[in-house]
Amino acid sequence: MQKKTKVTSLLMLLLLLLVAAACGSKEITPDTGGSVTNTEEKSAVNSPSAEPNKEKDSSAKTRIFEHAKGKTEIPTHPERIIAIQYTGAMLALGVKPVGGDNEWSVYPLLAKEWEGIEHVGDPWTGLNLEKIIELEPDLIVTHAEQTYEQLSKIAPTLFIPWLQYDVREQITVFGDILGKQPEAEAWLERFDAKVEATKQQAGGIIGSGETVAIVNVRPKNQFIYGDSAMGGYVIYQALDLNAPESIQRDVLDQKKAALEISLEALPDYLSSADYIFLSVLEADGGKERAEEVKNSALWKNLPAAKNNHIYALDWNTYFTTDPLSTEKQLDTFAGLLSAIKK
């Protein structure tokens, strides 16, 4: 009973501090217009790295970790972690956070591993700060700058901007954060073997001189994707498939997650694509709009359309860019390659 009263008092005190801090901050709402959010294109000014304790004692309970917001003292082996956006990296290393943001729990590739993780809201529609406090985390990792200060008042918090690291780098960084370096090395070995096997399969189907493009159609706009999201890492980075020259120049070389284009510009980016991988955000009229695009003369006159070389990338399968999802996307893409071969 005494413990419960103490926890309740702590909850009330922290919530009062968080409310006071939130009063001076500007509310950030989710992007409802279908455009690529800041998290897809944001880069960091600092690189997280571990800084050994001065005593260099391997049995030390805490250590200093440098990240994009400075240096934070974190547990050497954290046990109760809240993961905002980075759940997939932790799950890949066999670490299940006690809480995670709701946004990523809906994607099918993570469904099984997500079981048992408490939902704590998401930074765009609102984190459940009371829930986070109740979970008594000893470490929080987030990609959302606007809630960093609030979270850091609850527990040691690391700020790692999204897409600062590719899949391999995420595993290395989180192996360090979690004290799971051997597991990270083992994961990378398995991942590299899977990449090589899928690359051999792709090489037998898509020629070395052929090009592929990733197109995303939404309710009000459309995008050409680069090599970090919507299957881009698997297609361009892992499997080394080639992009058309215009996509290489305007998207990949510019390190853009995605480039919004007009319908009229579709031929500028897709007329030299031998294969097109199409993803559709079906909600809010996106499915109907995609049908309109595919039935347009602009689309039908594309070489890939004439040659029946357009293949669907399921939004929920390929939207996620964490290590665990990417590993499973390789299996899914291998199945897609088999369909192309037929």
Image (tube, grey):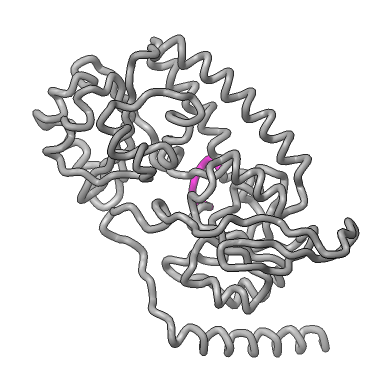
Query: Which residue occupies the foreground of this view, 154 or 114?
Result: 154
Is residue 26 left or right of 120 when viewed as pictured? left
The image shows residue 74 at horizontal and vertical percentages of 73, 66
> Which quadrant of the view contains residue 155?
bottom right
Give the residue at x 64% y 65%: 140
The image shows residue 169 at horizontal and vertical percentages of 60, 43
> Which quadrant of the view contains residue 78?
bottom right
In this rendering, the answer to whether 336 lies above or below 138 is above
What residue range appears in magenta? 105-109
Of the 4 image quadrants, the one containing the N terminus is: bottom right
Of the 4 image quadrants, the one containing the C terminus is: top left
The image shows residue 16 at horizontal and vertical percentages of 58, 90
The image shows residue 4 at horizontal and vertical percentages of 77, 84
Give the residue at x 58% y 55%: 47
Give the residue at x 57% y 67%: 69
Give the residue at x 49% y 28%: 332
In this rendering, the answer to whether 212 lies above or below 81 is above
The number of numbered badges drawn on the structure is 0
Is residue 188 left or right of 25 when viewed as pictured? right
Question: Is 339 colored magenta in this rendering?
Answer: no
The answer, for residue 119, to whether it is visible in the render is no
Main SS of residues in magenta? helix
In this rendering, the answer to whether 293 lies above or below 95 is above
Query: Which residue occupies the foreground of this view, 121 or 79?
Result: 79
